[in-house]
Amino acid sequence: CQDVCHVLREHDKKEEFAGPRFFVRVAGLEMHPMDSASRGGLLRKELGIGLCNITKCCTEVCPEEIHITDNAIIPLKERVVDEFYDPLLMLVRKIRGAR
């Protein structure tokens, strides 16, 4: 999956993007019912989840037939959006003075 990822192959942001294999691992941790850690900031700033444009190349070639895009990347992107781009939460943060 890492070899077919267009972000890792064709863009100059390779150091800013963790890649599909790592996102599957993070999704396993993030969605575990006993895990309470928030990884939204890590995903957004350090792992570059926003660089993935969901081409599903990684899913198509996965030898384990993992639906990487549907079961890992999209849910992680949704969590980042919920945490950082929710208009109501943005308003509350602005009122409280927090980022």
Image (cartoon, helix red, strand yellow):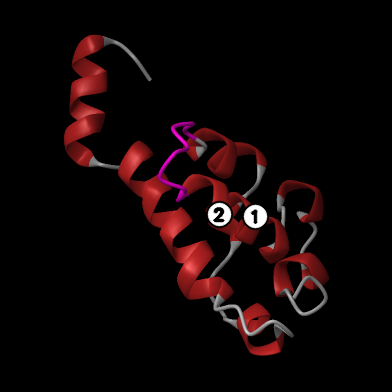
The label on residue 75 is none
| In the image, residue 99 above or below residue 43 | above
Image quarter (top left, top right, bottom left or bottom right) of the C terminus: top left
The label on residue 28 is 2
In magenta, the rendered stretch is 31-38
| In the image, residue 83 above or below residue 2 | above
Q: Is residue 54 left or right of residue 46?
A: left
Contact (Cβ within 8 Å) of mark 2 with mark 1: yes
Badge 2, how many Cα within 10 Å: few under 14, some, many 20+? some
Q: Secondary structure at mark 2?
A: helix
Label 1 is placed on what type of residue?
A: Arg
| In the image, residue 25 above or below residue 88 | below
**Rendered residue at 33%/14% (across/down):** 98
Q: Is residue 76 left or right of residue 14?
A: left
Q: Position of residue 54 (x, y in %)?
A: 53, 74
Which picture quadrant has residue 43?
top right
Q: Position of residue 18 (x, y in %)?
A: 72, 53
Q: Main secondary structure of the magenta part?
A: loop
Residue reaching furthest top? 97
Give the CA distance from mark 2 to mark 1.
Answer: 5 Å
- The residue under label 1 is 25
Badge 1, how many Cα within 10 Å: few under 14, some, many 20+? few
Taking depth in this image into account, of 15 and 34 the one nearest to the observer is 34
Residue 77 part of the magenta segment: no
**Rendered residue at 42%/60% (across/down):** 75
Taking depth in this image into account, of 97 and 25 the one nearest to the observer is 25
Label 2 is placed on what type of residue?
A: Gly
| In the image, residue 79 above or below residue 38 | below
**Rendered residue at 37%/37% (across/down):** 84
Residue 33 part of the magenta segment: yes
**Rendered residue at 49%/46% (across/down):** 30
